[in-house]
Image: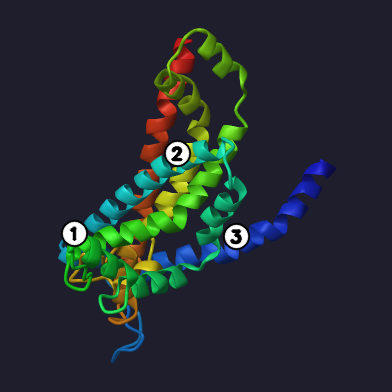
Amino acid sequence: MRSNKVGWLLLAPTIVVLALFGIVPFIYVLYVGFHQWNPFGANPSMIYNGANNFRRLVFDAEFLTAIWYTLKFALFAVLSEVVIGYFLAQLFMREFPGKGFFRTIHTLPLIVAPIVVGSVWRLMTTPSIGVIPYYLRTWFGFDLNIGRDPNAAFILTVIMDIWHWTPLVTLTLLAALVSLPKEPFEQAEIDGASRSQIFWHITLPMIRPAILATVFIRLMDALRTVDEVWMLTGGGPGAATRYIGLHIWKVVFPKTDYGYGSAISLIVLYLTLVMCWLLYVALVAPRRDARKVA
């Protein structure tokens, strides 16, 4: 009994912090989501409007477009980061000249603030002074201008996110690969298994928890990205890169529609939880079924 009291006493500061900075803001946003509120308007008081803000979402073309582009961005970015990160992790498992230097350079993007990343990529892609448009025009004759080409703007936001966050995926998967036991791989090689068979039947099942955790983290980050894309494209051209985080920002701050912005935030939180849950079920359920069969 005494140990339980000591444990709760030690956990009390963490619980208080989580309550103050997690639960209380969520309850407040939930409350605001059921009100019409413009604190800078003629009537700054909250007006209860029931579920009108949530009903409005269904017919909001800008919101639906932002959701669609956000899902595309998250799919391409996270999938590319996992694939590239795995191959880089496998590369770092081997010895080659300059391995330490290359690994250090590879992890440098992680220490750069997202807003700085967006600013640097904005400079590199500016048609008049950017190094990327210059070499694309010189080598391939391609005129890159993300201010007027929606597809190029979308692709560049994906590439920027891959450049920034692939090192995190690499380090996570590298730690998982290093911790794997050698006996199953040695036995598979003795039995004549190919590399693809070893990957699908030994490596992938054993590092699945690390992949799951990495995808969860990157998926949640990709769905709420704001500062990098804001600095690079500002959400344009048009709505090509107006992802849901930018859409919420523009609804809440320039339009000062706090009630509707809160409703969008809650729906996005719900969609994120649902996607993570579906991903968890898709990756964990086959593993449980295999254990039952065994």
Local secondary structure at mark 2: helix
- Using the image as rendered, state which of residue 42 and residue 246 is in the foreground: 246
Q: Looking at this rendering, what residue extends furthest in the top direction? A: 191
Name the residue at 41% across, 26% down. 285
Q: Nearer the viewer, mark 2 or mark 1?
A: 2
Amino acid type, mark 1: Val
Name the residue at 65% across, 62% down. 16
Circle 2 crowding by C-alpha within 10 Å: few under 14, some 14–19, many from 20 = some
> Would you identify the image quadrant in which residue 185 lies?
top right
Name the residue at 42% across, 67% down. 29
Amino acid type, mark 2: Phe
Local secondary structure at mark 3: helix
The image position of residue 214, as x and y in percent, is 48, 44
**Residue that numbered label 2 is attached to:** 87
Can you tell which mark lies on residue 22?
Answer: none
How many angstroms separate mark 2 from mark 1 (CA)?
A: 41 Å
**Residue that numbered label 1 is attached to:** 58
- Using the image as rendered, state which of residue 200 and residue 106 is in the foreground: 106
Q: Earlier in the sequence, mark 2 or mark 3?
A: 3
> Would you identify the image quadrant in which residue 136 lies?
bottom left
How many angstroms separate mark 1 from mark 3 (CA)?
A: 32 Å
Q: Looking at this rendering, what residue extends furthest in the bottom direction? A: 42
The image position of residue 196, as x and y in percent, is 40, 22
Above/below status of 101 relative to 224: above
Q: Earlier in the sequence, mark 1 or mark 3?
A: 3
Above/below status of 139 relative to 11: below
Q: Nearer the viewer, mark 2 or mark 3?
A: 2
Residue 34 visible within the image:
no
Q: Earlier in the sequence, mark 2 or mark 1?
A: 1
**Residue that numbered label 3 is attached to:** 18
Above/below status of 56 relative to 269: below
Amino acid type, mark 3: Leu
